[in-house]
Amino acid sequence: MEREIMFTGIGGQGVQLGAQILGLAATREDRHVMLFGTYGGSMRGGNTDSTLVVADAPISSPPIVSTTWAAVSMHHQYWEPMRRKLTAGSVVFLNSTLFEEEFDRTDLQVIEVPATELATEIGTPLAGSMAMVGAVAAATSIVGIDSLVQAMEESLPGYRKQHAADNEKALRAGFEFAETDVAPAWTQREDSNGDG
């Protein structure tokens, strides 16, 4: 089984880092992962998108998808191309602090997460993507919070290691905000001993 998760937002919101952390956390839980990130013409303020495919078996094709199981939008500005890849039953995570676009929500499972607000409330306003990734993990059970925290610590470049504690707070705030397992990624998760 494969699960596609597309991320979009504005450069500087941490979209690429959030997707990377979720992907690395999935590998820590023995999943197969492919990640493909794209960037607009400017580092901050341009569009930034990432496609993550997580599977329970090897992935044979690159993560360029025509449809997506889940979508994560940190801002509405570059939402439209991703919206067109949604299908009936897709799970949509919106950063309700900033997302203002109206769209047809029929047949979609929309989960609004005030990611930027959650991060601001704990004193880390730039960690909105961490709060969102925490919420995605809780709502889908695609990975656990401990794997996320470990992946975040591994993903931070040396010059950003001082942000690890704040990022962990944001991950946990998002995880605690979301209702657990409301959009399960897996129908059954087998433990290493074979128990379901």
Image (cartoon, rainbow, N blue to C red):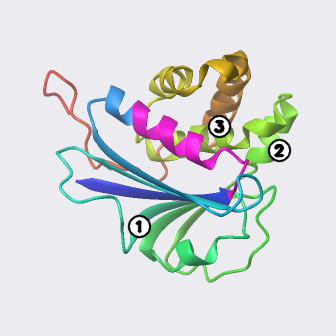
Q: CA distance from mark 2 to mark 1?
A: 26 Å
Which circle marks residue 180 in the picture?
Answer: none
Q: Secondary structure at mark 1?
A: strand
Residue identified by numbered label 3: 130
Label 2 or label 1, whichever comes before in sequence order: 1
Residue at point 81%, 55% (across, down): 97
Residue at image location 81% in from the left, 31% down from the top: 124
In percent of width and height, residue 175 lies at 60, 35
Residue lying at the far left in this picture: please name it: 194
The single residue placed furthest to the front in the displayed view is 41
Residue 115: % across, % down: 73, 46
The residue pinned by badge 2 equals 117
Residue under label 1: 68
**In the image, residue 90 above or below residue 123:** below
Chief secondary structure of the magenta span? helix
Gap in Å between the C-alphas at discs 3 and 1?
Answer: 21 Å
- In the image, what residue type sits under mark 3? Met
Q: In which quarter of the view is residue 10 placed?
A: bottom right
Q: How many marks?
A: 3
Q: Quadrant of residue 40?
A: bottom right
Q: Decide which of 45, 149 is in the foreground and name it.
A: 45
The secondary element bearing badge 3 is classed as helix
Percent coordinates x, y for residue 44 in the rendering = 76, 53
Classify 27 as above or below 181: above
